[in-house]
Image (spheres, rainbow, N blue to C red):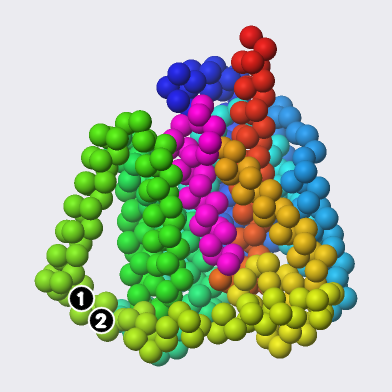
Amino acid sequence: MKKGNSKNNTLLSINERKNLDWLWLISVFLFSINLLEKGQYWLIGLFITALIIINHKVSKFKITIDLLLIFLFTVSYFIIFSLYRSAGMFTILVFLVGPIACFVLGYFIVKTDYNFIVKSMITISIGLFIHGFLNMLKYFQIYGFRPSISERIIPDIWTGVNIAATLQGTHYAIISSLLFYSIIVLKDRKHILVSSIIILATVLSAIFSFISGTRTLLVIIVINFCFSFLIYGFQRRKNYKEFLKLLFAILSSFTVVYLIYISNTFGIKDFVLNSTWYLRSETNTLESDPRMLFWKTAISQMFQFPFGGYRMGFSYAHNLWLDVLNATGLIPFFFLSIYTIKSFINLFTIIINEFVEIEFKIFIFSTFLGFVLQFMVEPILEGVPYMFLLFLLFNGMTKKYLDLCKSQKNSRAQE
């Protein structure tokens, strides 16, 4: 919140019991890193930990339209999905129980302190990144460090099973989306260690993307950075001198990076030109990406197969919403689409709230956009379903924060 309102937030947080927050952060870290490929057990552990902390903080909960939409989507998706695929305990946990529970617990566990959301999501983003980083270390151990690879598959550190390079990129999406946030925080000389970790992780993620030929992550970084910059500029329009200083610093940094590249310092230019990313970009344009064909096919056949059934002629559309349409049809697709729109409305409401700190607005926006952009290009529910659960956990926390903002606004209006 703004300086004039930060005191109110502090006062609200004084009576919040935070001595067990560390237990929550450990729990979300273990789940996000998927330690030893025991994600279902870490998810159950996350639920138990959340219940302990909720009871400790005596947090409040209320039924919202968001929860109703998630419930309708989850139940309809699970029922129709079960008609076509076997529904074991893992399916029940991840597709039926998980989405509802993650949103509810995310909403429940936030009491008054918005920094709890920041700590939780940064911990999650670091956990996801470390998992991806360990996968790359295993790859380098097997094949050595080289800029290009013949087959775009990366071994998983926990199982040794090869995963597609595109799914490997999901480990980097959230932390890389926080690049602009880390810059503005670092500018104010706050949270220097965390900001430095985010920047370093983003650089490493970009290097790994060049090696694996994952263009998606680089696009996500650029789009997220540009939109975050525009929002920050709009929010700082009354203080244009500070904004211009930041703009000058960013342009100077980009200029230095460009000069380093064209001079081939440290062999960076050779690395890029010989990378899998560059070779793919030279031979395959974005327009020729098969995803485009899958998306067009899914949209054109949406009424032809109203109950899905994987009959659209492809396994995955590489898009969360269209994959839901292919698998289970119009009903779950409708509820998921409405929920997505509602989530965007929540995000927009936070951004235009004049009492919310600009840094927090950028953090919420960057994280949300990082999830959504990733969901637009990957088979999430049947590829990396835990990403969807983390998204709902995040949305639950931000929805609670939004409701707290509305409550405080109403209280001020009555004073």
| Label 2, label 1: how far apart the Cα atoms are | 6 Å
**Residue located 59% across and 65% down the image:** 375
The foreground one among 206 and 192 is 206
Quarter of the image holding residue 301?
A: bottom right
Circle 2 crowding by C-alpha within 10 Å: few under 14, some 14–19, many from 20? some
Q: Which mark is residue 22?
A: none
**Residue located 77% across and 85% down the image:** 311
Can you give x and y, in whole percent of width and height, for residue 75 in the image? Answer: 84, 59
Task: Identify whether 51 is placed above or below 371.
Answer: above
Quarter of the image holding residue 211?
A: bottom left
Look at the image and tell me whether residue 85 can be seen: no
Quarter of the image holding residue 296?
A: bottom right
Q: Which residue is mark 1?
A: 269
Can you give x and y, in whole percent of width and height, for residue 141 in the image? Answer: 37, 78
* Span colored in magenta: 351-376
Residue 360: say if magenta. Answer: yes
Callout 1: helix, strand or loop? helix
**Amino acid at dot 2:** Leu
Q: Which residue is mark 2?
A: 273
The foreground one among 196 and 89 is 196
**Residue located 76% across and 53% down the image:** 70
Q: Quadrant of the C terminus?
A: top right
Task: Identify whether 131 is placed above or below 215.
Answer: above
Callout 2: helix, strand or loop? helix
341 displayed left or right of 34: right
The foreground one among 140 and 178 is 178
14 displayed left or right of 105: left
Cβ–Cβ under 8 Å for marks 2 and 1: yes
Residue 298: say if magenta. Answer: no
**Amino acid at dot 1:** Lys
Circle 1 crowding by C-alpha within 10 Å: few under 14, some 14–19, many from 20? some
